[in-house]
Amino acid sequence: MQGNGFWKKAAQLTARLAVILAIGYGTAAGYMYLTQRGFIFVPTGDLSSPEEKGLEEIVVETPDMADGTQVTVWRAEPAAEGNPTVLYFHGNAGNISSRWQRFRQILDSGFGLYAPSYRGYAGSEGKPSEAALISDGLEHFDRLAASGTPIIVHGESLGTGVAVAVAARRPAADLLVLEAPYTGLADMASEQYPWLPVDLLMKDPMPSSERIKNVEAPVVIVHGTADSIIPVEHGKRLFERAGDPKQLLIVEGAGHGDLWRNGLWPAVLEAWKRTR
């Protein structure tokens, strides 16, 4: 009888522990589900004017998207007819004015610039999501294409998912440049939180590895071996999925934000020459 009592208490304790663990797991999963966009989209800083950054060539536009949401765009025409315009989709943190040094280099090369601020970021209304950013990205592409300029679609980090989605649905894109890309946001989340059912919880999976198969434009992927945010393996796997022509530039020792200082823009210039 005493033995039976022991096992009964052990079973009760195990059941209670299982309930506690289930509640804890459910709470953690629920928290991640509700707050996930706060990890993906991190708008920070105030939006400076182009003049404050020495970019007098840039005009600030505030177009209304299809649903009436107003966003900010920094825009400059190419220096000469036939030169391309870079449709620039920025990363998850900061805002478009924090990319001013990159924009300076683009303009100094004689290229035009069309850099939209995502919804919810400095200068733009609304809230960001995968669906909203891609819908807006397609509208931005069409606005730019109406001017007749050749278009280089450039995605930086988070923006690579938007860039791939836009290029996949707009075959008129002349070149796709992916700076430190991911195969998918769901893939990133699965690697960071392997204990969560990411496929069920993810609101914005951004499956670039599937979408890039539909891109007809030449593709340039640049990634650093020391990238601690998006491992270089993501860039390599995405390159394998891309169609020809394509180029993969692996920068030894470069981190997530070092690529522009380590040969990215010269690689883009060379890739553009090859398209001509």
Image (cartoon, rainbow, N blue to C red):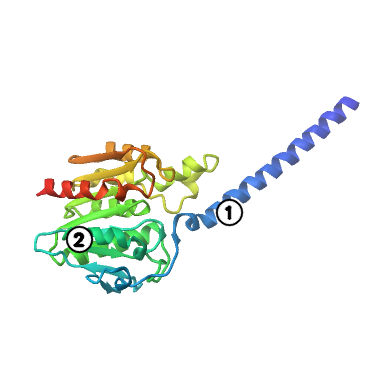
Amino acid carrying label 1: it is Tyr
Tell us which disc is closer to us: 2 or 1.
2
- Which percent across, then down, holds residue 45? 44, 66
Q: Could you tell me residue 275's position as x and y percent?
A: 12, 48
Question: What distance separates the C-alpha of mark 2 from that of mark 1?
Answer: 46 Å
Q: Between residues 202 and 264, which one lies in front from this camera angle?
A: 264
- The residue drawn where x is 33% and y is 46% is 208
Task: Estimate how packed mark 1 is, as few (under 14), some (14 to 19) or many (20 or more) residues with alpha carbons within 10 Å.
Answer: few
Residue at the spot of label 2:
108
Q: Identify the mark nearer the N-term, 2 or 1.
A: 1
Q: Which residue is mark 1?
A: 31
Q: Residue at x 62, y 48 (%)?
A: 26
Q: Quadrant of the N terminus?
A: top right
Vertical side of 169 occupied by 121: above or below: below
Residue lying at the far right in this picture: please name it: 1
Query: Is residue 206 left or right of 74 when viewed as pictured?
Result: right
Q: Position of residue 241 (x, y in %)?
A: 28, 38
Q: Quick one: 68 or 189, which is closer to the camera?
A: 189
**Based on the displayed image, in which of its 4 quarters is residue 102 positioned?**
bottom left
Residue 1 visible in image: no
Q: Amino acid at mark 2?
A: Asp
